[in-house]
Amino acid sequence: MAPSKEEKKFILEVIEMYHGFPELWKVKSKEFSDREKKEAAYDTLLLKYKEWYTEATKDDLKKKLNAMRTSFRRLALLVHPLRTHSCHELMFDKQV
């Protein structure tokens, strides 16, 4: 079943909120290794996530975020393959 327009809008709001917490996704930041900040950020995101998915747990939220990151990376690879592969790998792929 395809998500409704309202659900898509809600997910975009969650993504925007997620982007505001670099401790969850920005590996090179100092906050990324701070477990307390991460837990606080997940708790805040979970409150927002429960507006639409009332029975959601922190694990459900983490799975959803991971799935969205994976989908984004796959699409980014299709759109910009040169950014993720070295020239040698692309030459090898063409030869095969």
Image: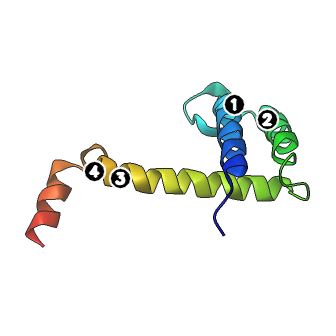
- The image quadrant that residue 19 belongs to is top right
**What is the number of the mark on residue 77?**
3
Task: From the image, tell me which residue sits under label 4.
Answer: 81
Neighbor class of circle 4 (other Cα within 10 Å; few <14, some 14-19, many 20+) is few
Residue 28 in the figure: left or right of residue 1: left
Of residues 69 and 39, the one drawn nearer to the viewer in this rendering: 69
| Residue at the right extreme of this rendering | 55
**Would you say the residues marked 4 and 1 are in contact, meaning their CB atoms lie under 8 Å apart?**
no
Residue 68 lies, in percent from the top left, at: 59, 53
Eyeballing the image, is 26 above or below 94?
above
Q: Is residue 33 visible?
A: no
Quick one: label 1 or label 2, which is nearer the N terminus? 1
Q: Secondary structure at mark 3?
A: helix
**Would you say the residues marked 1 and 2 are in contact, meaning their CB atoms lie under 8 Å apart?**
yes
Q: Amino acid at mark 3?
A: Leu
Residue 44 lies, in percent from the top left, at: 84, 36
Of the 4 image quadrants, the one containing the N terminus is bottom right
Cα distance in 3D space between marks 4 and 1: 28 Å
**What is the number of the mark on residue 41?**
2
| Residue at the left extreme of this rendering | 95
Residue pictured at 83% horizontal, 40% vertical? 48
Residue 11 in the figure: left or right of residue 41: left
Of residues 46 and 28, the one drawn nearer to the viewer in this rendering: 46
**Would you say the residues marked 4 and 3 are in contact, meaning their CB atoms lie under 8 Å apart?**
yes
